[in-house]
Structure formats: structure tokens, C-alpha cells
Amino acid sequence: MTAPRGRVLVIEDNPLNLELVSGVLESLGCDIVPAGTAELGLQLATQAPPDVILLDMWLPGMSGEEAIRLIRQDRALRDIPVIAITAQAMRGDEASALRLGFDAWISKPIDNRRLRELVRGYLQSRRESR
């Protein structure tokens, strides 16, 4: 089963993590839009809203927590699924991320299969709702 083609904005400051995530998403046929900071990611999302956003929680400058607040306040972006990516994997971190407005949460090291399933599901859901 192939995933619907879609644009995924990956806001990640670590080049190795960006490369890993990009490889997984490209295997689904996704177009990747990379951003090394939340500020750049928000700018890119505003210019051309993606189908899904992967957002690292710990970024230089604006944090993922600040960025998700701005995304959820923006009319053009608020309905885009946003997946938190974090090295924080303590009990309660996932629930905290969901309360902040993230749709899903993945801890590092990233489980490639879970990432594929999440993105595939969000892309299919967005395609069906159009």
C-alpha cells in the first residue's frame, strides 16, 4: 500500500536527524521541506502550507512549544497535523505534548515504522477530507 504524495515540513536543527527523517519520508513519496529553526519553519509554512509538520521540541531560538502555539493560532495552519519530535522521553511528556496542541509525539531515537505509519495516516486523512 502506497501513501498519498504530500508535502512534509520538517523543523529539525540536527542534520543527522533531518537526514534520517527525510529518508523515511521520501520512501513514502513525500516532498520534504527542511527548516533548521522554528522561525524559518513558520515562514515556510505560511508561504505554502504543508500537509504535515514534524517539529523538534528543542530548537535554537524559538522552541517547539512556542511554535505549536503560533501554528494553532494561525487560521491557515491550525488544522495541519503536527508531530512533536523530542529526545525527552519521560513519563508524561507525550501527554504534555498533546495538551500543547500536537497531534502526535515521537521520541528520539525515532522509530521509523511509527513515523511512517503516522505520516501515512495523516496524509490519507487529509486527502480524504478534501
Image (cartoon, rainbow, N blue to C red):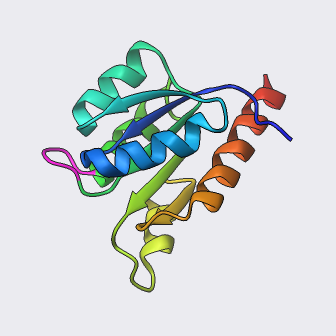
Q: Position of residue 116 (x, y in %)?
A: 65, 50
Q: Is residue 54 visible?
A: yes
Tell which of 78 and 38 is nearer to you. Answer: 38
Region in magenta? 59-63
Q: Is residue 56 magenta?
A: no
Q: Position of residue 14 (x, y in %)?
A: 25, 49
Q: Residue at the spot x=73%, y=32% of the render?
A: 126
**Residue extending furthest toward the bottom:** 91
**Left or right: 86 as drawn, with respect to 6:** left
Whether residue 44 is situated above or below residue 95 in the rendered picture: above
Q: Is residue 80 visible?
A: no
Q: Residue at the spot x=77%, y=27% of the render?
A: 127
Q: Position of residue 13 (x, y in %)?
A: 24, 45
Quadrant of the rendered image containing residue 38: top left
Q: Residue at the spot x=47%, y=47% of the render?
A: 21
Q: Main secondary structure of the magenta part?
A: loop
Quadrant of the rendered image containing residue 100: bottom left
Work out which quarter of the rendered image holds the C terminus and state it. top right
Q: Position of residue 24 (x, y in %)?
A: 56, 45
Work out which quarter of the rendered image holds the N terminus and state it. top right
**How many numbered discs sit on the rendered protein?**
0
Q: Residue at the spot x=70%, y=36% of the render?
A: 123
Whether residue 29 is situated above or below residue 18 in the rendered picture: above
**Residue extending furthest toward the top:** 47
**Left or right: 62 as drawn, with respect to 107:** left
**Residue extending furthest toward the left:** 61
Tell which of 22 and 46 is nearer to you. Answer: 22
**Left or right: 63 as drawn, with respect to 1:** left
